[in-house]
Amino acid sequence: MIRTRFAPSPTGYMHIGNLRTALYEYFIAKHGGGKFILRIEDTDRERYVEGAVDIIYKTLEMAGMKHDEGPDIGGDYGPYIQSERKNDYMKYALELVEKGEAYYCFCTKERLEGLRLEGETGVKYDRHCLSLSKEEIEKNLKNGIPFVIRQKIRDGSTTFHDEVYGDVTVNNEDMEDQILIKSDGLPTYNFANVIDDHLMNITHVIRGNEYLSSTPKYNPLYEAFGWDIPTYIHVAPVMKDQHTKLSKRNGDASFQDLVAKGYLPKAIVNYITLLGWSPSENREIFSIDELIEIFDVKGISKSPAIFDPEKLKWMNGEYIKAQNFDEFYEMAEPVLKEAVKTEGIDLKMAAQMVKTRISTVYDIPALIDFIDELPEYDKSLYNHKKMKTNTENSLDFLKLIIPVLEKAEDWDNDSLYALMVNTAKENNLKNGQILWPVRTALSGKPTTPCGATELCVLLGKEESLRRLKEGIKLLES
Ligand code: GLU
């Protein structure tokens, strides 16, 4: 059975690249009917940020991913947490010591620093403690001398296969006797990672290619234990531009930031999946279920992908267009309430008008800013070639329509449309010759999210007529 894991370090920020890795892990597991595991890699206590696990949880939940197993946390299952598994790592390190594949190292910090000072860069540990006798080791342990446990790297070379990058071979001479357990008793990052991947029966390791250079260190461990090596799938980074990676340090948005900016989790998931992975069909909009269905490792690219905010905006707009109205309104209502202070405006109607014209709900205020107050506008807005209107004839057209509208009994879209079109017909005018000046006078803007009659309904009879008369004043000035 396919088993993948998402193994974030709790640094307090859900990086877009991290989330993309989680998605690929999730899709690969689910595509094969397998399991998706969540493991918090918190052995580096210096990088630990309070509350970070909650952010990870929340992000996965919002993105639509739920991990499949973990320790019981009262009715639900939590993630596996490395710092709570300290004893396991020590046990396995001692097993390697027993097998002669690892050894205690009591070298002091000063000695190690001295070694580095004498050597060139890339100098390796000199295996000083490899030759300690059993008695010396026992004496040191009894006396409580701090130690680390190092793996004794075997001679030869190490080759590992990556599904994206192919075979990578490293000469073992270039590898140091890596530390497995640090002097604080905690495992090193790489050791814990291998032990856990094995204990959790992980079949596919998917992660950022910044780990590609650490991977050769993993195989000697698998070999020392005699364990099966998982399939490696390293993915290229998500970039801000040609040269810079997306990162918190550069102030780039996290998943949570994007959600706060009005992006729908589904749109973000869809967009970031396509950063570095291409489906075989020529389409761009996919639901998470569709992605599970079609995801194929073969589509993962070796080269970095650039995060394009404009493309995400477009995609979010497509998701908003397809959203059912009630769901959209729930999301848009707070923004509409903030943007429209005039009493009695039908906010649902305003929401209908803008739904197909925005990338995020925060585009709404600029589209409807004319509702509360008619903006000051230049009369040249009445010039419209196609509609055959200009500043002179628009004055006549407004004068024609105002009395008709004053008499109007039904102030709804259809009735108003019929009145305006009939007036145009009776006077041998094009429809636009009535509709365009009305629209201009009501909004004071060159573009509006709706037509003249809808503007009338939205603003109401009294305000509409007031604005039409203002239009006359402007055109007469
Ligand atoms: N803990 C690592 C990170 O947060 C992931 C390493 C891995 O997936 O093996 O980047």
Image (spheres, rainbow, N blue to C red):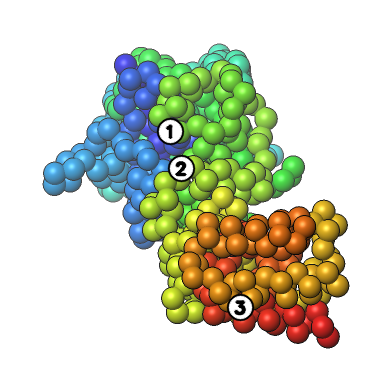
Of callouts 2 and 1, which one flags the residue occurring earlier in the amino acid sequence?
2
Between 472 and 243, the one nearer to me in the picture: 472
Q: Residues within 10 Å of mark 3 (few under 14, many from 20)?
A: many
Residue 288, numbered label: 1
Where does the image place residue 411, in percent across and percent down from the top left? Answer: 50, 67
Q: Are marks 2 and 3 in contact (CB under 8 Å)?
A: no
Q: What residue does disc 3 label?
A: 465
Of callouts 2 and 3, which one flags the residue occurring earlier in the amino acid sequence?
2
Where does the image place residue 349, in percent across and percent down from the top left? Answer: 48, 61
Q: Is residue 106 left or right of residue 393?
A: left
* Farthest-out residue, front: 426
Eyeballing the image, is 259 above or below 373? above
Q: Residue at x 66, y 48 (%)?
A: 310
> In the rendered image, which quarter contains the N terminus?
top left
> In the rendered image, which quarter contains the C terminus?
bottom right
Q: Which residue is drawn at 71% across and 72% down?
A: 400
